[in-house]
Image: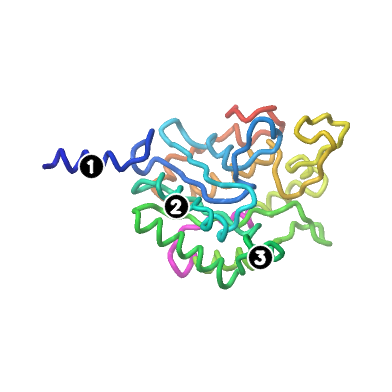
Amino acid sequence: MVQIVLLGVILTFPANATAPGSTILIAGDSTAADYAPARYPQTGWGTMLRCAVGPDVRILNHAMGGRSTRSFLAEGRWDALRADMMPGDTVLIQFGHNDASRAKPLRWAPAQTDYRDNLLRFIRDVRIAGGVPVLVTPVARRNFGPGGRAVADFSAWSGVMRDLALKTGTPMIDLEARSRAWLDRAGPEASRSLYLHYSAEDNVAAFPKGISDDTHFSELGARQVADLVADGLKSLALPISAKISGSRPALTRTTALGRMDCQ
């Protein structure tokens, strides 16, 4: 009977799964998403987070461009993530950028109502499945105010997330605060290299006409934001925290590698 029960448990695990508790799943938007090589140098922090863990940890990145809490649920992406999750696994939840898109009804999730309710559902679903939800406030855009300090563009949404973290006892990485401090250290000019700023003369194949984008990251920016996330995750003292590398040279590079390897 014990063998039959154990077999039943094994068969419910996703294909190619590691041991329960050794997977980090990411629910989020374009700032965290994986991209095809043809899109390089555009890179999501979720891609580079793989450089913060050892080979015994699997990262399943379900983040997708243009998604909010509303559309992530409506399109079945949350259900797909839940199907990949095993008891003890960690789920990083970062939304806010697209929830604030009032002009796009399929994305729009007002902070104090729909966004709050959707986050509560995420927290509940992960806990019911035996997982560990971790809220991640929306990463900052390269937007500097009159005083030369990075601005919080999604303060209403990050405020709701902080409030829910406190009221529900959910671990949280305040990536908004961490990334604003990161931008402040870099300054308005040097921070251009952390986002997608290329001219036609730079001959970047993905952006032949050039691009000026203060939301999405270059390879270098994604590496450094992943380092902020890894540092936050390690500081939470969760079971997965012990599996986050203390030294992360691949994420603290000051020059781009030209690819997304962990070097």
Figure check: 81 above or below 105: above
User: Looking at this rendering, what residue extends furthest in the bottom direction?
Assistant: 112
Residue wearing tag 2: 79
Q: Where is residue 200 in the image (x, y as percent from the top left)?
A: 87, 34
166 in magenta = yes
Say which label, 3 or 2, has the lower sequence index. 2
Front-lying residue, 156 or 172: 156
Crowd tier of the residue under label 2, counting other residues whose Cα lies within 10 Å: few below 14, some 14–19, many 20 or above: some
User: Looking at this rendering, what residue extends furthest in the left direction?
Assistant: 1
Q: Where is residue 162 in the image (x, y as percent from the top left)?
A: 55, 65
User: Looking at this rendering, what residue extends furthest in the right direction?
Assistant: 201
Q: How far apart are marks 3 and 2 (CA)?
A: 28 Å
User: Which quadrant holds the C terminus?
Assistant: top right
Residue wearing tag 3: 155
The secondary element bearing badge 1 is classed as helix
Q: Are marks 3 and 2 in contact (CB under 8 Å)?
A: no
Q: How far apart are marks 3 and 1 (CA)?
A: 45 Å
Front-lying residue, 213 or 143: 213
Q: Distance between the residues labelled 2 and 1?
A: 21 Å
The secondary element bearing badge 2 is classed as helix
Residue under the image location 63 percent in, 44 percent down: 225
Figure check: 79 above or below 155: above
Q: What range is drawn magenta here?
A: 165-178
Residue wearing tag 1: 8
Crowd tier of the residue under label 3, counting other residues whose Cα lies within 10 Å: few below 14, some 14–19, many 20 or above: some
Q: Are marks 3 and 1 in contact (CB under 8 Å)?
A: no
Residue 209, image quadrant: top right
Residue under the image location 43 percent in, 48 percent down: 90
Name the amino acid type tagged 1.
Answer: Gly
